[in-house]
Image (tube, rainbow, N blue to C red):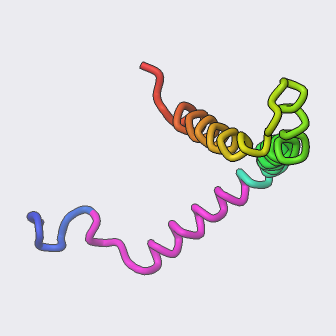
Amino acid sequence: GGAGTGAGPGASWGLADCRRTLLQSLAEQKSAWDEHGHCFLLALGFSFFVPASSIFALQAYGADILRVCGIKEPLRLLPLIGWVKLAGAFTAVAGADSEIP
């Protein structure tokens, strides 16, 4: 069995083998979900509600906080603060996905 002849080690795979592999993979995923699903949902909820509450606080109290800091027209700065916040979130995500040498 040379290359390209279809007689190599993977040539014996049929539909039944693919189905068995798929079912085995699904069973392993279900087992992992059963074991760790509640932790995943807790982390997902935490990762949603922390930024959501921060965004709400920025929208609800941003102008008031800027007024306390002495800015007379805070509404002009809110879009800039939003862009800086977005850049900070992007930097955090990019940094989390990067490898440390």
Residue 16 part of the magenta segment: yes
39 is higher (above) or lower (below) than 17 = above
Quadrant of the rendered structure where residue 26 is?
Answer: bottom right
Residue 82 part of the magenta segment: no
Quadrant (top left/top right/bottom left/bottom right) for the C terminus:
top left
Q: Is residue 96 visible?
A: yes
Left or right of 96 on screen, residue 75: right
Percent position of residue 72, x then y: 82, 33
Which SS type dominates the magenta stretch? Answer: helix
Q: Residue furthest front?
A: 72
Q: What stretch is highlighted in magenta?
A: 10-31
Left or right of 54 on screen, residue 17: left
Left or right of 101 on screen, residue 60: right
Percent position of residue 30, x then y: 71, 60
Quadrant of the rendered structure where residue 92 is?
Answer: top right
Quadrant of the rendered structure where residue 67 is?
Answer: top right
89 or 101: nearer the viewer: 89
Percent position of residue 61, x then y: 90, 40
* Residue in the image at 18% along x and 70% along y: 7
